[in-house]
Amino acid sequence: MLPRWQPVAAPAAAAVIAAIHGSRVCGCARAGLRTAGSRAACQASTLQWRPTSCVPPRGGRSSSSTRPSAAAVVQAVELPCADEGMLSVGDALEGLRRLLTAAENSALSVEDVLAEPQAQSFLAPLGAACKSFSPQDVRQVLVAFARVQHMPLQLWQQGLAEEVSRSLEELPDLHVVHVALLVASLDLDEPLDLLQDLAEQLEIRAHTLSPTGMAGALIALSQLGPWPSSSTAGLSVAEELLQRLDELSPRELSASALAAATLGIRAQTFWQRLHGALLARINELEPKHIADATLAVATNRLLPIFLLEAIQDRLPHVVGQMEPDE
């Protein structure tokens, strides 16, 4: 018997740190390309943040002769009655956990399993059931879908997106950052009202976030959108981050630089200090950090000569350790 739904035990701080440290970040395509340089930077790095804190490597796939049908996978889950108004919060969360676990562990794509009529019959009223969820329940639903890297649009558009917006004000600071990163990782660029709510909440909370939270917020904002060219999304977070640069890890520092460049932040004082921080820690930067720092410089096109020379000197020491996408 599958264990009942349990909230993620790891605190939000651990989830945000894992998000920043677990993979390279490139938000150019998601945040809107403003220059030819940023287009080139985005083409050079197509990886976006994935929630590595909750995405275990999948095992081997079974052969086609033993592969169950999507209908059989859903039927084996024994989903609870999903008639609108009859689905309790506990049953909804438990049924969702069982369904997504079965889909992830099957030899089929998650999209195919969730497209089955029986799965759709369960998911359709789930959007309405979300109105009874607590803010933490809503966050855990996002975690569950981020785990399988798929969000059914029917569920998202018919209640869940609205409940995410509703829950933001009641969530602690780092949980709001976590939600923003989860929404970005699922490529959910609508509704626009939700994106604006996320941006507003991150900007309002910028002064109370930890340095890691600020970095996560800036990264999330760079991958949400695209934002209008006149938008100042991320500026307040960047200004607060400027006071805490020495508290960032090399990964957080380089990822923040790329996120700020992607957002189109142009403040000279900000970049002078951020370039100076990267320069001061150049010998601490690992291959992925060098790649992000270089992409940031290519995107903002400010040409910091001393930093560029330092990156050039550092490259021979790390190039042999770089992955092809770096």
Image (cartoon, grey):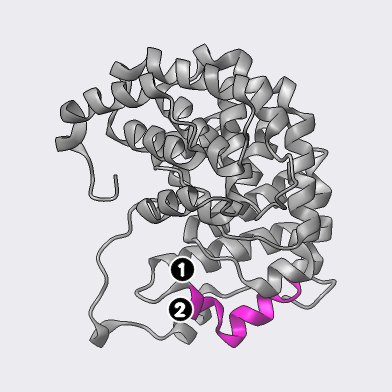
Q: Secondary structure at mark 1?
A: helix
Closer to the chain start, of discs 2 and 1, is 2
- Circles 2 and 1, Cβ within 8 Å, touching? The answer is yes
Q: CA distance from mark 2 to mark 1?
A: 7 Å
Q: How many residues crowd around disc 1 within 10 Å: few (fewer than 14), some, or many (20 or more)? A: some
Identify residue for label 2: 73
The picture places residue 313, in percent across and down from the top left corner, at: 22, 23
Q: Is 163 placed left or right of 102 in the picture?
A: right
Q: Looking at the image, can residue 150 be seen? A: yes
Q: Over which residues does the magenta segment extend?
A: 111-126
- Residue 102: assigned label: 1
Query: Taking 70 as reference, is 27 above or below it?
Result: above
Q: Which of 52 and 8 lies nearest the eye of the viewer? A: 52
| Residue at 60%, 79% in the rendered image | 119
Amino acid carrying mark 1 in the image: Ala
Q: How many residues crowd around disc 2 within 10 Å: few (fewer than 14), some, or many (20 or more)? A: many
| Residue at 36%, 83% in the rendered image | 68
- Residue 39: assigned label: none
Q: Which of 195 and 103 lies nearest the eye of the viewer? A: 195
The picture places residue 195, in percent across and down from the top left corner, at: 73, 52
Amino acid carrying mark 2 in the image: Val
The picture places residue 320, in percent across and down from the top left corner, at: 14, 36
Query: Taking 143 as reference, is 239 above or below it?
Result: above
Most common SS among magenta residues: helix
